[in-house]
Amino acid sequence: TDIYGIFGYPVKHSKSPQFQTSAFSYLNIPAVYLPFEVKPEDLEKAVESIKVLGIKGVNITVPHKEEVIKYLNEVSEEVKYIKACNTIKNIDGYLIGYNTDAEGFITGLKQLIPNLEGKKVLVLGAGGASRAIIYSLIKEGVDKIYQANRTLGKVFKIIEDFKPLTKFIEEIILPISYDKIECCVLPYVDIIVNTTSVGLNEEDKPLFDYSKIEKKHIVIDIIYKKTPLLKAAENKGCQWQDGLPMLLYQGAKAFEIWTGKKAPIDVMKKALL
Ligand code: ATR
């Protein structure tokens, strides 16, 4: 039996054990997938244990995604840009890090809009989660990313870090303050993505006036529930999506990296829901 798992702190809430286990069992792969609660100060030892115990692969979740990188033998290209790793594959003691959040996000978004080339996107937030989303949007050839954040320094840092990806980076990512969204961004964008934690609690102050959302907008929130932003989008008749598709597809991609087999999406989706 092969061992897989997820490192997080806390990790109890994670839905990965249930849907990864469903995939292994559906494909008759003898494997277990376990949640491991790893304290930040124990992360290095925990990563070492992957090798020692012969664990085949792990997912990495909050708060370890950035920190874990320095303990790996190699990371893939997207991890270098995103500076976060959510999937580790163990090849005979050699640990390779991937970030499947980026592809997971895009696969989910493409269910609503199959071709992203030339699209204009409003991204709310400039934290770790936004970096995976920005990376994947640029790879898909979007035209503009208006990126709003309270502290715009973080957006300038992203522009700086993503320079090697395209020489047009300064024309693609445009920093924008929240008070300019209604007048100067909403009329022009096709897609709105919330990457902040705002909306997790109903009483959170909205990031902008959601009543200004129009039917033409596709609205995504990476939080795993119908937030006030998504409710506003639904009221306007927009296409919208919560964070579950991103969760599902990042997991499916991790499964494929570990096993080399096509992930049974429908089975995993059923287990997730
Ligand atoms: P994650 O890895 O989930 O992206 P993070 O790196 O801590 O987490 O980033 C959190 C993001 O949510 C940031 O963009 C943060 O904005 P600031 O950089 O200005 O702090 C944003 N955020 C959190 N709470 C917010 C709030 N109440 N209003 C606006 N933005 C908020």
Image (cartoon, grey):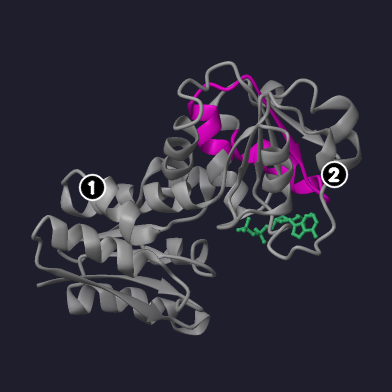
Q: Which residues are magenta?
A: 134-162
- Residue furthest to the top in view is 118
Please check the rendered image and state whether residue 10 is part of the magenta-colored stretch, yes or no: no
Which residue is at 76% across, 28% downward?
214
Instruction: Name the secondary structure under disc 2.
Output: loop
224 in relation to 40, above or below:
above
Residue that badge 2 annotates: 208
- Indicate the quadrant containing the C terminus: top left, top right, bottom left or bottom right: bottom left
Write down which quadrant ligand 1 falls in: bottom right
What is the x, y in percent for residue 46? 36, 79
On the rendered structure, is 103 left or right of 127?
left
Q: Earlier in the sequence, mark 2 or mark 1?
A: 2
* SS under mark 1: loop
Q: What residue does disc 1 label?
A: 263
- Between the C-alphas of marks 2 and 1, the distance is 38 Å
Left or right of 131 in this view: 110: left
Q: Position of residue 58 (x, y in %)?
A: 31, 65
x and y percentages locating residue 237 in the rendered image:
67, 32
Residue closest to the eye, 94 or 179 = 179
Residue at coordinates 44% horizontally, 53% vertically from top-left? 247
Res. 73 visible in picture: no
Residue sitting nearer the eye, 9 or 154? 9
Q: Quadrant of the N terminus?
A: bottom left
Which numbered marker is on residue 108? none
Residue 146 vs residue 165: left or right? Answer: right
Task: Give the x, y percent position of residue 197.
Answer: 68, 59
Residue, x 77% and y 33% (percent of image)?
213
Residue type beneath disc 2: Phe
Q: Circles 2 and 1: CB distance less than 8 Å?
A: no
